[in-house]
Amino acid sequence: MTADGEQHPTTNEAGAGLVVEHITHRFPLPGAGLFGRHPGFRTVLDDLSLTVPPGSLTAIVGPSGCGKSTLLKVLAGLLIPASGRAEVNGTPLIGRPGGVAYHPQQDALLPWLTTLDNATLGAEIAGQSRAEARTRARALLDRFGLAGTERAWPDELSGGMRQRVSLLRSSLMPQPALLLDEPFGALDALTRRQLQFWLLDITAAERRPTLLVTHDIEEALLLADRVIVLSPVPAGIVHIEDRPDAELRREQREHGADHPAAQRILAALGPGSGT
Amino acid sequence: MRVLLGQILPAVAAVLGLIVLWGLLVRLPGVPDYLLPAPERVWAVGWADRDLIGRHLWATVRIAVSGFVLGSVLGILVAIALTLWRPLRAATEPILIASQAIPPVIFAPILIAAMGFGAWPKILVVTLGAFFPVAISAGIAMREADRTLVDLLTSMGARRLTVLRRVRLPGAVPGIVGGAKISASYVVFSAIIAEWMGSSVGLGVYLQRSQASYRMDQLFAAVGVIAVLGVLLFWASALIGDLVLARNRAIAAGRST
Ligand SMILES: Nc1ncnc2c1ncn2[C@@H]1O[C@H](COP(=O)(O)OP(=O)(O)OP(=O)(O)O)[C@@H](O)[C@H]1O
Ligand SMILES: [Mg+2]
């Protein structure tokens, strides 16, 4: 059932893909800095290392509040970790925003832009022409269930629609790696399934290393070449589940044959874990 | 129609009530006519003097509106500059605040002495008073912009200027409109002070002459005109502000690049 390392595409030259090494991050405790005194820090990420090869998807699961979003913010250049390195295809990421296509947990849409303009925002800021980005966005509107909403304002969309606009925006960004923080959380089962298969397709086609944070173990088992289980805060890796290739994963899902893997992940998450 | 019933009617009723009260007050024994003229006499004097008052009014309107527009634009530019360059903000904020503590009666004569009796020194006095509320409220709105949106743009690799243009500025429109409304309620006051300090035309000049010749009826007529002008300018700015807010999203969406 469990695949070993050979079955996902690791045949890459050194440095290719997303490489994360020994990331440790601390947040100041509340009240820190008041009157110049520091009551201390709380370690949220504890010496995390992982590698996502090109064309491969790694899913991260872990209890709520363990530091999954924090890891993605570090890789997106929004938080500077206490220590550690990260790079994509050899380009450093730490403290350098703009290096990855990042989908934040909250679907942050600009209220003054329409669906189409929100969807093309990331591509435009990365320097792509607006016309080209619009063409690519229009081609995907149907698949994202957003047909007919291209001129709608964000406050006219449902929560699930907003999330899909946000996902469309991240996927249109040209950066060499894709970081998705719970991109399917607010979706109905059907749309979710559709977009999960879409994600499988583009990961294979675009060959971008993809990091997916999710609370849904079935989703992780279907989409990921590797599932990483994190401990409660401070997050450290407690289990790595390597998965067979996408074709086999789909089959397993149809026959409910990924149960043992799910059991191992649940066991790693520990009793009473909220995931 | 609803605006008329809901907003204008109660206001007109309240003003009429005040005028009636004033009319009753002057009829009390011991209230001398040369201190507090009766409302009907103020009206009669004002109506007889309407050509002259109209000319002065027009001069004041020009100065107040020009100063308001210039001040609002200046306020937005100052807010942008102070948002982009934090050291500049630390360095200049006390100076900006101090500029508001100095009453226009002190620097108006200096400006007039330096720039002559034309409209410009007076417009400048109004501008200096009008830019401040806009600069402060626009600046706060830009600096306190939605954190998740700023982070989003940052994660996309946007430069500070892009974050300003795509997030901070469009998000600050309600703040700018609010600041401009406050400014609008000050501009008539500033314009009158500037004219009073040295001018050949304007309601401030008319006021000053009426006072110098102890013509309380003329003075009150001018005060009435000033009050109405102040309210009309405020309403106009509020109306424009509402239109801007309603079109805020559309403008941002229709922008080029
Ligand atoms: N800006 C911050 N300042 C201080 N502490 C923070 C900050 N952001 C997050 N934390 C703390 O860091 C920990 C990890 O937060 P994070 O958002 O990464 O969790 P998560 O794993 O994404 O959780 P969830 O699954 O609920 O989204 C939490 O305990 C949170 O309280
Ligand atoms: Mg999270």
Image (tube, coloured by chain):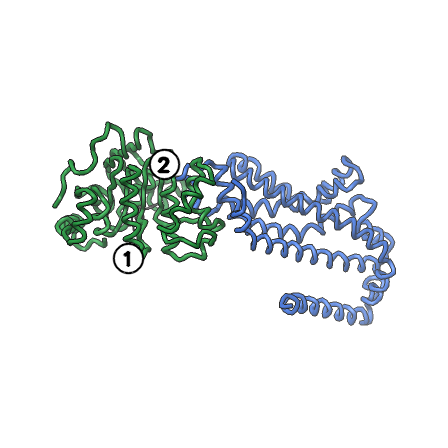
Chain colours: A green, B blue
Q: Position of residue A203 (x, y in %)?
A: 28, 41
What chain does badge 1 belong to?
A
Callout 2 secondary element:
loop
Q: Is residue A173 visible?
A: yes
Q: Is residue A246 left or right of residue B226?
A: left
Q: Residue A69: which disc? A: none
Q: Position of residue B218 (x, y in %)?
A: 84, 58
Q: Is residue B16 above or below residue A247?
A: below
User: Which mark sits nearer the N-terminus, 2 or 1?
Assistant: 2
Q: Position of residue B146 (x, y in %)?
A: 45, 48
Q: Which residue is mark 1?
A: A189
Q: Amino acid under label 1?
A: Ala
Q: Is residue A187 left or right of residue B75?
A: left
Q: Is residue A43 visible?
A: no
Q: Amino acid under label 2?
A: Gln
Q: Residue at x 39, y 50 (%)?
A: A141
Q: Which residue is mark 2?
A: A175
